[in-house]
Image (cartoon, helix red, strand yellow):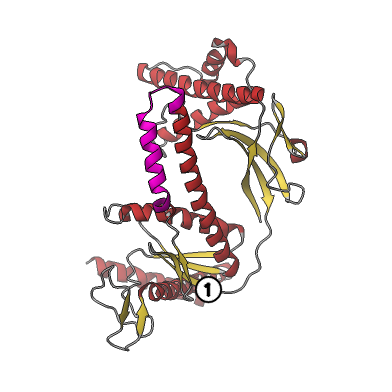
Amino acid sequence: MIVTKSYKLRLYPTKEQKVFFNKTMGCSRVIYNEMLYNLSENYKNGIKKDKFELFKEIRTKYEWMKKIDSIALYSSFMDLDSAYQKFFKKQSKFPKFKKKKDKNTYRNTTPRKIKNVIKGNFIKLSVIGLVKFRQDYNFEELNIVKYRNYTIERSKTNKYYCSICVDVDIPEYKHTGEVLGIDLGIKDLVIDSNGNKYSNPKYQAKAEKKIKHLQRLYSKKQKGSKNQEKARLKFAIAHEKLSNKRKDYLHKITTKLIKENDIICIENLNVKGMAKNHHLAKAIQNASFGTLISMLKYKAKWHNRQIIEIGRFYPSSKICNCCGNKMNYMGLEVREWSCPVCGEHHDRDINAAINIKNEGLRILDNVKQSTDEVSETNMLVENPTMDDKSAMTLKSSDSMKQETKNKR
């Protein structure tokens, strides 16, 4: 399957190349902020001015922008233009000004071939030339169909990365025909309908003591001093390690689930609503339910798998998967229970995962039946006879009568 994917490379630029990257990021930020300010002021005062002319004025206003990558400045202008249009279409909020301390990036969209971009352990970038990088991917073995653009990023730990965006043909995993139900939790992160449990490492709790200590050291340093920058760097590195550990673990779990199963049934969780519980908010956010579900969804698209979401109000924990009996109340403190009707002893999470699987299969059967009915009606419409027409009108009239009766 051909998908649009980015490959992130760690760069090792020289001092001159670092200066160029920093200047280009700064100029892109200036273009974005000045364009945003001028557009908003013109809109308030009722002044109509062409955006491209405004872009040229700002660019020629500063002499130090002449030696910068012009495509990067233009892409920054286009990003603001799209954000501005989305605001007026009520698709997003009003764009905010970019801060120097925030994420520093710039993008270049010069059309090229991937062979001309990657040369051994070096990547060829516009204006600056060849930059050394760590080779984590073998681009010769990848089935790259089209090269799109690259984005240079400077992280908060002062590391430089290049994300190459390409269209790549990803081979699908072998289909196994297996169906799996998944329940997400805090004690165990993932519990499946086969009885397997994937533990929650709780990286945040393990690194919390160190992060608190580094944060305290950072707050005590003099503002703007070199010692404060050293303390900030240590603090940022600790957070980066924590984020990398969490992402690595989630990638391993989701890849295994997608490899081994063709259909995965999950709950449609309201993560924002769950985080409003002050007793569990921290644990829920550290578990990263939203990231795990999003990873499952895009990997399922890549490898032609099905993700079935059941309703968030479905009582998966309260229903016995053997006889279907529903318990009236079951608090979070109840981890194991026995059904009063059939006497079956259940593990709360495994029972919930089995019920999620069964409900997902029921939804899938209903969808198949509805699609079969639609295909049959389409066939009737293509070659209608008098008998078929009368049957179709009778069905529609019956449905109309039922609707009017219900309304009355």
Q: Is residue 171 left or right of residue 207?
A: right
Against 394, residue 124 (above or below) is: above
Any magenta on residue 190?
no
Q: Residue at x 53, y 60 (%)?
A: 254
* Residue positioned most to the bottom: 342
Q: Nearer the viewer, residue 345 or 223?
A: 223
Q: Is residue 190 left or right of residue 163?
A: left
Q: How many callouts does the rendering have?
A: 1
Give the quadrant of the N terminus: bottom right
Name the residue carrying label 1. Answer: 179
Q: Quadrant of residue 287?
A: bottom left
Secondary structure, magenta segment, majority class: helix
Q: Residue at x 65, y 64 (%)?
A: 173
| Type of amino acid at the residue the image marks with label 1 | Val
Give how far across and how far down residue 47 sits, in percent: 41, 16
Any magenta on residue 223?
yes
Against 268, residue 84 (above or below) is: above
Magenta-colored span: 204-228
Q: Nearer the viewer, residue 231 or 11?
A: 231
Give how far across and how far down residue 86 sits, in percent: 45, 35
Q: Is residue 1 left or right of residue 186?
A: right
Q: Residues within 10 Å of mark 1 (few under 14, many from 20)?
A: some
Circle 1: element type: strand
Q: Nearer the viewer, residue 205 or 347?
A: 205
Give how far across and how far down residue 358 sits, in percent: 43, 76
**Residue 55 appears in the picture as rendered:** yes
Against 252, residue 368 (above or below) is: below
